[in-house]
């Protein structure tokens, strides 16, 4: 039986999401932005699993979606970091506001 | 509402997770950010454990800590020059982002505490792993295949992009 | 309950103690907490003290295999040598190098030791005598080895030393690569036994095939067991896969800047990790605590388990003491071009074979046969490609001896 109220878990998810959003918007370094995005995905996963546990405990739908998010996060991290390394090689910086080749 | 031992554990885990999350976004040294990130991932795994999703908790540790965090640390080391002698770590949006983050949290918290969630008082499935396996090859077979293709493409693509020419 | 009951079945002691606490008027959660804390302390104590014996054993056996004497001064047969070393390490100065990243420098050895303690919790020593019989036991084991690689990478980075950093890179490259064959060979066993919980795995292998052959996984899938053993050598950072501490190339690996007690933690992790890998091999492939009369006297399970584990550990030491180190490109090639494709084939064989007829005994024979065929075909292909390689080099370098290539 669930003892802890559902809203506590959702609050943690909301808090982590807000922190991640700040990280993704405010940091200059591309790797730091990527870390913020990972926090966002984790926050979403907390919500998925919490709803699964409290609203449809007889099913595993939320956990399956969380696993999909996990797989996409892995793909995203791999491609994102590869891009960052490639940019670092050619531009010698990974600060996003200095990567402005397409700006007239 | 009765306050039990489990509540204490939850508060400790949640506090740890949020603290580590804050550490990720405010720490100046990128490597320290990565260490905070590992802590946050571990905290989220503990939250899954509290939600009785053991499989997901272990998968979280395996994929996020074992693979993604390692990858991030690698990327930090390979582009090491970027950490030295840079005073500014935030861009011009930092102030407004902080406001947006706090407002978003306030809004979400307000909504979350207002809604009557249709909570079911019921125990979880005794052995969820076979159920998940079955769901992957029946209901969710197409997303599952798409994810598999996505992962292969990402693998090959990442190697192609990052290789030295 | 009397003392003979415990001797016959040591796994009763946990529930008995729990009942004792409850009858003393404690609340349920307090009794649970006390029981858990005692269990954790027992496991930590056992893990940390076993290292003393393991280090002595490894030195002595490696010495005998290489026709040396080994430690023989401190105590009978040099048994107290490790204690002397511990005293030496404790009295050494604890140096933190200049420019080191203090937080991660101190965190890294803790992570390494944490990994072995966490893994020790899922080792079933006898029927039901286990720290935690997790339903995701083997997955947990693989997840924990990721923590060790993070620890090594952290140590390499924090030391502010290029050799340490190179060592850290090598650790991650090797551990992550060999995790794939490791996980897939475990997956083969999981498909066949239908469980990931370590105690249930050992129990499942108690079934008799055709009524008399023990259903150990090494008999059902010898090739998967061999792959797991090779991956174990790599995960345990042992020769021929000890590139992480290749003295002739990168001095000593990620722990190069550590001294005193912190160095001792890395040392401890190396030796205990080998024992734990041997224990996992025993549990998954050698039937764990299964053996004759184990149903009547579960205490015998402890004896069987440790005899089997020490034999596996002995095999690990034997390989370490006899084989030279691989080159780093050979190490990576062997993993990605040989082990990974081959384990995929083995998983496929087991997945198909487990359902081919309704009779498990016949399925086991089919899987076993297919495993041996796969092993022979693999050996043939490797042998041919090696021979072709040698011939190509001979053509490229006329007049040189091929013994050097």
Image (spheres, coloured by chain):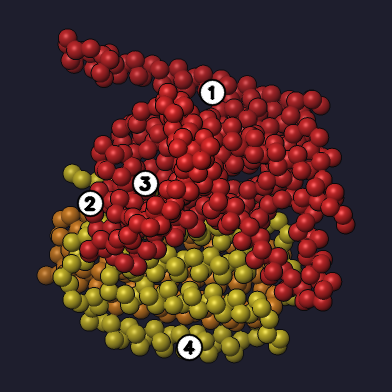
Chain colours: A orange, B yellow, C red
Between disc 3 and disc 1, whose residue precedes? 3
SS for dot 3: helix
Viewer-side residue, C149 vs A64: C149
Location of residue C155 in the rendering, given as x and y in whole percent from the top left corner: 34, 56
- Tell me whether the residue at label 1 lies in contact with that at label 2, contact meaning CB atoms closer than 8 angstroms: no
* Quadrant in the rendering for residue A79: bottom left
Real-space Cα separation, disc 1 to disc 2, in angstroms? 42 Å
Alpha-carbon span between mark 3 and mark 4: 45 Å
Q: To which quarter of the image does residue C340 belong? A: top left
SS state under label 1: helix
Q: Are marks 4 and 1 on the same chain?
A: no
Subunit bearing disc 1: C
Query: Pointer 2: what residue?
Result: C162
**Left-right relation of B155 to C189:** left
Q: CA distance from mark 3 to mark 1?
A: 30 Å
User: What residue is drawn where x is 68% and y is 32%?
Assistant: C216
**Closer mark to the observer between disc 3 and disc 1:** 3
Residue C93 appearing in the image = yes
Q: Residue furthest top?
A: C399
Q: Residues within 10 Å of mark 1 (few under 14, many from 20)?
A: some
The residue sitting at 54% across, 32% down in the picture is C314
Mark 2 secondary-structure assignment? helix
Q: Which residue is mark 1?
A: C374
Which residue position is annotated with label 3? C171
Q: Position of residue C240 (x, y in %)?
A: 39, 32
Count residues near mark 3 (Cα–Cα under 10 Å), then give few for <14, some for 14-19, many for 20+.
many
Residue C18, compared with residue C357, is above or below; it is: below
Q: Nearer the viewer, residue A93 or C306?
A: C306
- Of the residues tagged 2 and 3, which is closer to the observer? 2
Tell me the subunit letter for badge 4: B
Q: Nearer the viewer, mark 1 or mark 2?
A: 2
Q: Which mark is residue A28?
A: none
């Amino acid at each position: 039986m669930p003892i802890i109220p559902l809203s506590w878990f959702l609050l943690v998810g909301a808090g982590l999401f807000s922190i991640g959003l700040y990280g993704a918007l405010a940091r200059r370094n591309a790797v730091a932005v990527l870390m913020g995005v990972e926090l966002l995905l984790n926050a979403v996963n907390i919500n998925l699993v919490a709803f699964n546990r409290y609203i449809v405990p007889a099913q595993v739908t939320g956990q399956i979606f969380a696993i999909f998010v996990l797989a996409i996060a892995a793909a995203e991290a791999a491609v994102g970091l590869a891009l960052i390394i490639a940019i670092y090689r050619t531009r010698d910086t990974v600060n996003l506001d200095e990567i402005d080749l397409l700006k007239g | 509402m009765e306050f039990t031992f489990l509540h204490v554990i939850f508060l400790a885990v949640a506090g740890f997770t949020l603290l580590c999350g804050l550490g990720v976004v405010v720490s100046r040294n990128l490597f320290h950010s990565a260490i905070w990130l590992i802590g946050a991932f571990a905290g989220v795994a503990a939250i899954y454990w509290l939600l009785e999703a053991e499989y997901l908790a272990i998968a979280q540790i395996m994929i996020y800590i074992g693979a993604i965090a390692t990858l991030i640390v690698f990327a930090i080391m390979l582009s090491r020059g970027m950490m030295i002698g840079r005073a500014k770590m935030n861009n011009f949006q930092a102030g407004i982002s902080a406001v947006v983050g706090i407002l978003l949290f306030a809004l979400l918290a307000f909504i979350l505490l207002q809604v009557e969630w249709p909570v079911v008082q019921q125990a979880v499935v005794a052995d969820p792993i076979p159920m998940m396996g079955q769901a992957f090859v029946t209901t969710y077979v197409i997303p599952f295949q798409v994810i598999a293709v996505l992962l292969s493409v990402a693998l090959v693509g990442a190697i192609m992009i990052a290789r030295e020419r | 309950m009397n003392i003979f009951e415990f001797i016959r079945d040591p796994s009763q002691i946990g529930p008995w103690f729990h009942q004792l606490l409850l009858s003393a008027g404690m609340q349920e959660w307090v009794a649970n907490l006390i029981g858990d804390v005692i269990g954790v302390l027992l496991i930590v104590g056992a893990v940390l003290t076993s290292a003393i014996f393991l280090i002595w054993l490894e030195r002595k056996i490696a010495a005998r295999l290489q026709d040396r004497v080994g430690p023989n001064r401190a105590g009978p047969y040099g048994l107290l040598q490790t204690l002397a070393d511990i005293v030496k390490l404790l009295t050494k100065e604890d140096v933190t190098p200049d420019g080191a990243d203090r937080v991660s420098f101190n965190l890294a050895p803790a992570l390494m030791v944490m990994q072995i303690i966490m893994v020790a919790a899922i080792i079933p020593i006898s029927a039901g005598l286990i720290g935690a019989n997790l339903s995701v036991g083997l997955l947990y084991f693989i997840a924990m080895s990721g923590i060790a690689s993070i620890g090594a990478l952290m140590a390499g980075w924090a030391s502010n030393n290029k050799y340490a950093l190179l060592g850290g890179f090598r650790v991650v490259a090797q551990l992550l690569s060999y995790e794939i064959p490791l996980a897939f060979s475990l997956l083969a066993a999981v498909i066949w036994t239908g469980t990931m919980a370590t105690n249930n795995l050992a129990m499942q292998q108690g079934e008799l095939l055709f009524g008399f052959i023990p259903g150990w996984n090494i008999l059902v899938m010898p090739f998967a067991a061999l792959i797991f053993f090779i991956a174990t050598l790599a995960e345990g950072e042992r020769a021929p896969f000890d590139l992480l501490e290749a003295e002739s190339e990168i001095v000593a690996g990620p722990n190069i800047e550590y001294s005193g007690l912190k160095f001792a933690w890395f040392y401890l992790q190396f030796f205990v990790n080998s024992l734990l890998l041997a224990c996992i091999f025993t549990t998954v492939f050698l039937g764990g605590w299964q053996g004759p009369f184990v149903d009547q006297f579960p205490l015998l399970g402890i004896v069987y388990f440790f005899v089997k584990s020490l034999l596996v550990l002995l095999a690990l030491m034997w390989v370490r003491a006899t084989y030279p180190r691989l080159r780093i490109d050979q190490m990576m090639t062997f993993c990605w071009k040989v082990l990974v494709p081959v384990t995929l084939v083995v998983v496929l064989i087991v997945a198909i074979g487990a359902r081919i007829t309704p009779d498990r005994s016949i399925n086991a024979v089919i899987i076993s046969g297919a495993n041996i065929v796969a092993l022979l075909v693999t050996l043939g292909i490797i042998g041919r490609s090696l021979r072709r390689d040698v011939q190509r080099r001979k053509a490229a370098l006329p007049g040189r001896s091929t013994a050097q290539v």
